Amino acid sequence: MSRALPRAFFDRDVADVARDLLGRIVVHEAGGGAVGVRLTEVEAYRGEEDPASHAFRGMRRRNATMFGPPGHLYVYFTYGMHWCANLVCGPAGTARAVLLRAGEVVEGIEEARARRPAARRDVDLARGPARLATCLGFDGGSDGLDACAGGSLRVLAGAPAPAEGVRTGPRVGVAGAGATSPWRWWLAAEPSVSVYRPGKPRRRAAAGGETLAPVAPPVRP
DNA sequence: CCGGTGATGGACT
DNA sequence: GTCCATCACCGGA
């Protein structure tokens, strides 16, 4: 068994934390038992400096956890039905966090299947941020959970992912400024990495006009 | 495998 | 009213 990552791990630049989280196992003990997910895809959100971040327009009730200390879980509700989870990073005074986009269930797979009856294959259990959150049993009540306090949530130190297996590219589902910055990291040759999808523009493009240059999707070897 | 689209509610303009 | 850091399902190739 591996010990939990300490708070100092999260109290660093969000890009470094995101990359270093790849390959680590997030464990959450909830009703039904413990489920562990090995992270294969993450994204960095740079707080108030980042137009795509929930923290861009300042602190609100929903995003208050992002402004708090690193090592806590920020869970938000979206599209009227889905929960997604982030791990808050440092330094103190910022509102930066890493979105957990995809992973592979490595513990409690029977419980994960029970929570995700729509998944036809195990590789789809935690493929996508809302699916991953469902597997781990996260919901609104999980917002603010401390991953560094020896409680129901922890991120196992394990072994860092080999650098040669790490890829980086644009974030998924993000439009506008910041859409093309390479703030998404994933592990190559992982079937659980979610499919790349560029963010929709805020307004429909005018008919007949050339508008934005298309963003090349990251190559998936 | 792929693209199109409905679901469903809260946050924000 | 519009926009979501999305998912599941459907039909076509």
Image (tube, coloured by chain):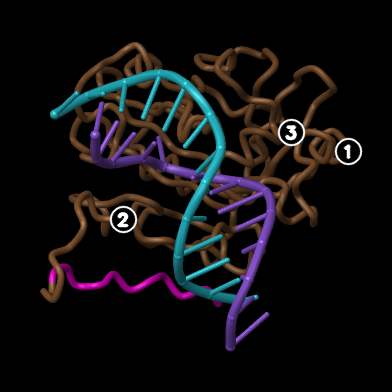
Chain colours: A brown, B cyan, C purple
**Residue A17 locus on image (x, y percent):** 44, 40
Q: Using the image, name the chain to which the residue with label 2 belongs.
A: A
Residue positioned 53% across, 51% down in the render: A41
Bounds of the magenta span? A211-221
Q: Locate the N terminus of chain A by quadrant.
A: top right
Label 1 – label 2 distance at C-alpha: 36 Å
Q: Using the image, name the chain to which the residue with label 1 belongs.
A: A
Q: Is residue A9 visible?
A: no
Quadrant in which residue C9 is drawn: bottom right
Task: Please tell me whether residue A19 is drawn above or below residue B8 in the rendered image.
Answer: below
Task: Please tell me whether residue B4 is drawn above or below residue A75 in the rendered image.
Answer: below
Q: Amino acid at mark 3?
A: Ser
Quadrant in which residue A212 is drawn: bottom left
Q: Amino acid at mark 2?
A: Lys
Label 3 – label 1 distance at C-alpha: 22 Å
Q: Are the residues under badges 2 and 3 in a single subunit?
A: yes
Q: Looking at the image, do the residues carrying marks 3 and 1 touch, with CB atoms under 8 Å apart?
A: no
Q: Is residue A173 visible?
A: yes
Residue positioned 36% across, 38% down in the render: A14
Residue occupied by mark 1: A110
Checking the image for residue A79, the label placed there is none
Residue positioned 88% across, 38% down in the render: A110
Q: Nearer the viewer, mark 2 or mark 3?
A: 2
Q: Are the residues under badges 1 and 2 in a single subunit?
A: yes
**Residue A86 locus on image (x, y percent):** 48, 31
Left or right position of A179 against A28: left
Residue occupied by mark 3: A2
**Callout 1: SS:** helix
Tell me if residue A103 is in the magenta stretch.
no
